[in-house]
């Protein structure tokens, strides 16, 4: 049992497992941000643009009934089968809005990262004999006095 515990402890403390745990927690928090972006900002704008049409309530009644039902819930309560194509359309809209939200968020993070990155350091010319750094316009190495004019 001690060997098993030692192996488990070595596995659980590995950097990969801890990194994965952190990624799951941050992913959950990021999911909440994206859901809020879609549900609280993008969906109301889309509803405003479409005139308040709720596509998730669209359906086709499959079972026979004396009275046509006006909602999926009413048909389900009466035990009549329905083809809920509106739910499928809503799932596609949700997916596209979530993908758009993630794209916008990643693009914003990318812009912030670019601002933080410093310019790369200039490439330093080195003497081919002693490998010490020399000025770009030098013809002799100040360290070993080798002729480096043509190199």
Image (cartoon, grey):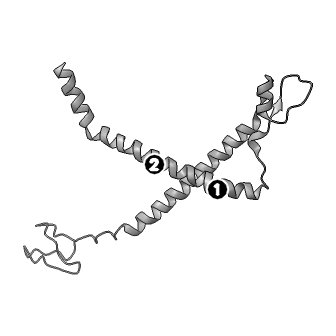
Q: Position of residue 130 (x, y in %)?
A: 10, 67
Image position of 42 with respect to 7: above or below:
below
Q: Residue furthest right?
A: 66
Q: Position of residue 12 (x, y in %)?
A: 27, 34
Residue 29's label in the rendered image is: 2
Q: CA distance from mark 2 to mark 1?
A: 19 Å
Quarter the C terminus occupies: bottom left
Q: Residue at x 51, y 60 (%)?
A: 107
Residue 120: image quadrant is bottom left
SS of the residue under disc 2: helix
SS of the residue under disc 1: helix
The residue identified by callout 1 is 42
Residue 48: image quadrant is bottom right
Residue count near mark 1 (Cα–Cα under 10 Å), binned few <14, some 14–19, many ≥20: some
N-term-proximal mark, 2 vs 1: 2
Q: Residue at x 89, y 31 (%)?
A: 68
Q: Position of residue 123 (x, y in %)?
A: 27, 70
């Amino acid at each position: 049992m001690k060997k098993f515990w030692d192996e488990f402890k070595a596995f659980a403390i590995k950097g990969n497992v801890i990194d994965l745990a952190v990624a799951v927690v941050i992913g959950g928090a990021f999911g909440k941000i994206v859901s809020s972006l879609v549900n609280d900002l993008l969906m109301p704008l889309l509803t405003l643009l479409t005139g308040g049409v709720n596509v998730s309530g669209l359906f086709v009644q499959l079972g026979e009934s004396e009275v046509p039902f006006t909602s999926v819930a009413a048909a389900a309560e009466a035990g009549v089968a329905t083809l809920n194509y509106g739910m499928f359309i809503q799932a596609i809209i949700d997916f596209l809005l979530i993908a758009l939200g993630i794209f916008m968020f990643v693009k914003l993070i990318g812009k912030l990262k670019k601002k933080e990155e410093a310019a790369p350091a200039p490439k330093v010319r080195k003497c081919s004999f002693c490998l010490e750094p020399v000025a770009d316009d030098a013809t002799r190495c100040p360290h070993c006095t080798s002729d480096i004019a043509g190199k």
